[in-house]
Amino acid sequence: MIKCEWGLSSPAMEYYHDEEWGVPVHDDRLLFEFLILEGAQAGLSWSTILNKRQGYRQAFDQFDAQKIIQYNGNRVQQLLKNSEIIRNKLKVNATITNAKSFLAIQQQYGSFNDYIWQFTQGKTIQNCWQTISDVPVSTQQSEHMSKQLKQDGFKFVGSTICYAYMQAVGMVNDHTVDCFRHTQIQGNLR
């Protein structure tokens, strides 16, 4: 069975590739989780973040934004000592900031899902890349998303991070055309 090259680097990456990457996500909590994890990845590899995903879930109350906005200085200090996450003060503080912005967006739009999927008109963009090197690191949509997220108070949401986010939550199908998941994901959207 042919898969995207990057999905063969470890059992965890293979599972993520086969089961999650590119599958459309419409659950607000999971959309928030991916937003935080993609921001945490800045300057690091996805495999590093994927290996710490359970630690992130435990450290950040299963990505419950209502709980995260209550974090105070003591809680931030605890998080900065937690080896199960990336101990970067800017990224930890960004998680709290992003939780506040996430809740504000839910209030304004009814759901984060409605807000975030507007950047692809509510549909998955079906790409047809031949090789992984054909896949861009950002697009016009991710540029627009980044600009709007920043305007709405989010941190660690540059265009490249936004594009990785779009890939993760299925706003784009960037599996290469020879990968078995490309057709599966495309077929599940009809």
Image (cartoon, rainbow, N blue to C red):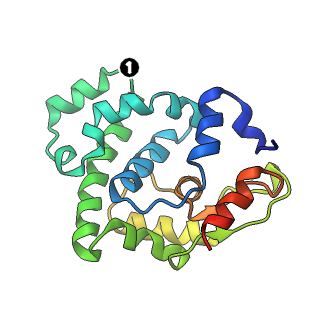
Look at the numbered disc 1 and give the secondary structure of its residue. loop
How many labels sit on residues?
A: 1
Observer able to see residue 45: no
Q: Is residue 135 left or right of residue 93?
A: right
Residue 112 spot, x, y in % from top left: 34, 66
Residue 25 spot, x, y in % from top left: 47, 59
The residue drawn where x is 52% and y is 57% is 169
Classify residue 175 by image quadrant. Answer: bottom right
Q: Is residue 25 left or right of residue 88?
A: right
The residue drawn where x is 33% and y is 53% is 29
Check disc 1 and give the amino acid type.
Ser
When the figure is inspected, residue 50 is found, relative to residue 39, above or below; the finding is above
Front-most of 26 and 145? 26
Residue denoted by label 1: 83
Q: Quadrant of the N terminus?
A: top right
When the figure is inspected, residue 160 is found, relative to residue 8, above or below; the finding is below
Classify residue 190 by image quadrant. Answer: bottom right
Q: Is residue 169 left or right of residue 189?
A: left
Q: Is residue 4 left or right of residue 16?
A: right
Residue 188 spot, x, y in % from top left: 61, 65
Residue 162 spot, x, y in % from top left: 53, 58
The residue drawn where x is 56% and y is 38% is 43
The residue drawn where x is 44% and y is 33% is 53
Q: Looking at this rendering, what residue extends furthest in the bottom direction?
A: 121
When the figure is inspected, residue 73 is found, relative to residue 64, above or below; the finding is above
Observer able to see residue 30: yes
When the figure is inspected, residue 150 is found, relative to residue 89, above or below; the finding is below
Question: Label 1: few (<14), some or many (≥20) within 10 Å?
Answer: few
Front-most of 77 and 128? 128
